[in-house]
Amino acid sequence: MRRMKLMIPGPVELSPEVLLAMARPMMGHRTPDFEAILEECWSGLKEIFQTKNDMLLITGSGTAGMDAAIASTIKEGDEYVCITGGKFGERFVEMVKAYGGVPREVKVEWGRAVDPAEVDKALSQSKAKAVTLTHNETSTGVLHDAEAVGKVAKKHGALFIMDAITSIGGDYVKADEWGVDICIAGSQKCLVSPPGLAMVSVSPKAWEVIGKNKTRNYYLNLASYKKSMEKKTTPFTPSVTLIYGLQAALRAIKEEGLENRIKRHRLMARATREAVKAMGLELYADEGHASNTVTSIKIPQGLTDEDVRGKMKKEHGILLAGGQDQIKGKIFRIGHMGNVEYLDLMSVLSALELTLKKAGRDIELGSGLGAAQRVFLQG
Ligand SMILES: Cc1ncc(COP(=O)(O)O)c(C=O)c1O
């Protein structure tokens, strides 16, 4: 099987250190040695989430973390203000409905960021128990203003539940400063680990709500995770192998430094945006709120998804992401999260220029590369 260069918004390419860590022999999960690994992971994650709240590690993909957050806080008839504007924001709406709650949707035009005044209005017109936000809406490439949403949620005394699955570890997430009560991450994105782990931080205010809630689910029950966490363990057998990988990934993040890491992600994002614009392409997301971990780009008129993503895959072995739902076939997305560096990005941009030129676009070869290089030159 041909090895693909992954430029999708997760799973991302893993370092040899992470891969090797996962080849270690199995260990008992109820042992002091494994407890030490868990504690190291919890504390490393707290630094990245910028929180002093409890940290829980769930075996399951990012959606398991979202599901746990909703299932553990909701009871039938509860209203939740759900900010949508993309596929992942809508997932919260589906979950609230699945548990018998009433979603009060703040619908944002796809590609745009939420206006906090709209959230304020929705909260004033409802008795919402919580607000849900997808910090970095991967499907559209939009980064929402979580700090502003957090302030509005606090003003109304609502819980703030945030999916930070594609921002944590790649962009600023200040869970405590922004008042995020339940903050969710996934392993296979900017945390550069394999898929299969969800990380969830929970505030004292959220624990109060959870404590009073008669939760109807069993496996994804945050209260069970807390009880076990206090005994330095997990309620069920965790994925030991994935946690070995996470431990190695968190050590690498610490070595790079969170601030440096975020700067690198922002540089990659800027270089990508300038390069594609110089190639004559149009960004899909509002540039003032563009994601720093994934860039969404309109497929130019006259070309198809196959002409761009199909050729990038076949001719260059580069995997890009497509559009989802209503924007399927209309956009493509370049993921630049995790360990992506100058050479990774330049090779992808170079292949993209060639692909567009071969497809008949009137572009000057090197125009996108030059634009990216100028961004890198400025730093
Ligand atoms: C913002 C966001 N939320 C949720 C998810 C779902 O995560 P998972 O596929 O790990 O369940 C994704 C996956 O891409 C995502 O990008």
Image (cartoon, rainbow, N blue to C red):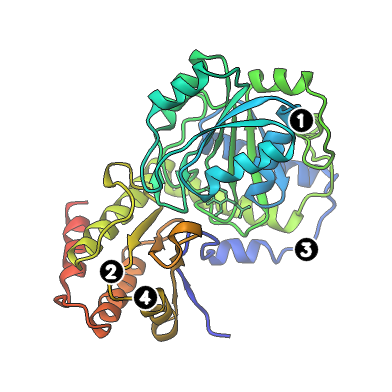
Q: Secondary structure at mark 2?
A: loop
Q: Is residue 123 visible?
A: yes
Mark whose residue sits in front, 3 or 2? 2
Please tell me which of labels 3 and 2 falls first in the chain: 3
Distance CA(mark 3)–CA(mark 1): 28 Å
Distance CA(mark 1)–CA(mark 4): 49 Å
Q: Residue at x 56, y 14 (%)?
A: 157
Q: Position of residue 245 (x, y in %)?
A: 64, 57
Distance CA(mark 3)–CA(mark 4): 47 Å
Q: Quadrant of residue 373?
A: bottom left
Mark whose residue sits in front, 3 or 1? 1
User: Does 5 appear above or below 285?
Assistant: below
* Residue that badge 3 annotates: 25
* Residue that badge 2 annotates: 300
Distance CA(mark 1)–CA(mark 2): 50 Å
User: Does 258 appear above or below 223?
Assistant: below
* Residue that badge 1 annotates: 226
Amino acid under disc 1 = Lys
